[in-house]
Image (cartoon, helix red, strand yellow):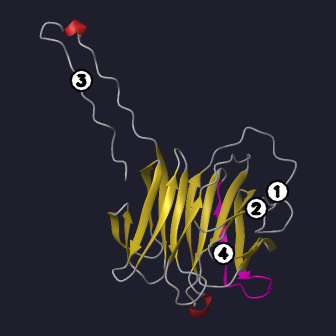
Amino acid sequence: MIVSGGLATASSANSAGSASSAREAPPAHAAAVGKVAIVQAVPKLSLTVTVDGEQVQQGVAEGSIVGPLDLEVGSHEIGFTDGSEEVTSTVEVAAGESSDVVVHRPAEVGGPPVVSVYPTPDDPLDPGKARVLLAHTATTAPADVVVDGQTVFTNIANGEFAQADVAAGAHEVSLLPAGVTGRPILGPLDVTLEEGTITAVYAVGNPKDGSMDVIVRTTGATPSQAEPPTEIDTGSAGLVDQVRVWTFSAG
């Protein structure tokens, strides 16, 4: 349930004239919450969004972001409908953490909408750095991501999410079919990343009908007090030196 306020409290006192002995009720404590941003990435649809069966917003067009919503800790059902079909997903909300819930098309043309849940990483950022996260939520085969002329993410499938910590500033980003060089299916895009921010980029649409686009959401990050790392970790989404990469599957 969406948290809209604190808990109600009551106080009591002894008889009139005994104010000095009246006991005040303890202060109310707000329920623990996490944040959920809902991203509408289904082309050409207007959707109604619900949380635990309650309508949050209707007429949500492609490219819109609802929230972030403050939700109580625990499981919540996020639903999407255009009046003819409905898709839902259960989201686990943790105190003080945030996630993006993205409704999008699958890789196959004409497939029904699916929902992917992407947690916002909260590990600290080093000085001078920004974090970029790119999710493949488009109707196309696995893709490679090229940043400033260098392939940094490889073979990202629909529903997968990769991230890297990079130098803050201006960058050029392109999306290409996995293992193929030549004309990008998206971009090149000029992206400016501010120091200390997390920028989530969702690739949407279908390159075959010219509808490829991106949805971007930027949030703040936790600064690091530690020295820059001397080792670089790489995950299954990418290969490339000096890039730290993780992959998240659809939730």
Q: Marks 1 and 4: which is nearer the front?
A: 1
Q: Marks 4 and 2: which is nearer the front?
A: 2
Give the labeled residue for mark 2: 245
Magenta stretch encompasses residue 189: yes
Give the labeled residue for mark 1: 233
Circle 4: residue type: Leu
Q: Earlier in the sequence, mark 4 or mark 2?
A: 4
Is residue 25 toward the left or the right of residue 75 in the image? left
| Disc ID at residue 189 | 4
Query: How dense is the environment of label 3, judged by Cα within 10 Å: few (below 14), some, or many (20 and up)?
Result: few
Magenta stretch encompasses residue 137: no
Q: Earlier in the sequence, mark 3 or mark 2?
A: 3
Residue 82 location (% of width, % of height): 37, 79
Circle 2: residue type: Val
Q: CA distance from mark 2 to mark 1?
A: 7 Å
Circle 3: residue type: Ser
Q: Which stretch appears magenta?
A: 176-194
| Disc ID at residue 11 | 3
Q: CA distance from mark 1 to mark 4?
A: 26 Å
- Which residue is painted at 21% across and 20% down in the image? 12
Q: CA distance from mark 3 to mark 4?
A: 59 Å
- Which residue is painted at 59% across and 75% down in the image? 137
Q: CA distance from mark 3 to mark 1?
A: 55 Å
Is residue 147 toward the left or the right of residue 222 in the image? right
Residue 73 location (% of width, % of height): 47, 47
Q: Which of the 4 image quarters holds residue 22? A: top left
Q: Earlier in the sequence, mark 3 or mark 4?
A: 3
Circle 1: residue type: Asp
Q: Secondary structure at mark 2?
A: loop
Q: Nearer the viewer, residue 55 or 230?
A: 55
Q: CA distance from mark 4 to mark 2?
A: 20 Å
Residue 118 location (% of width, % of height): 59, 62
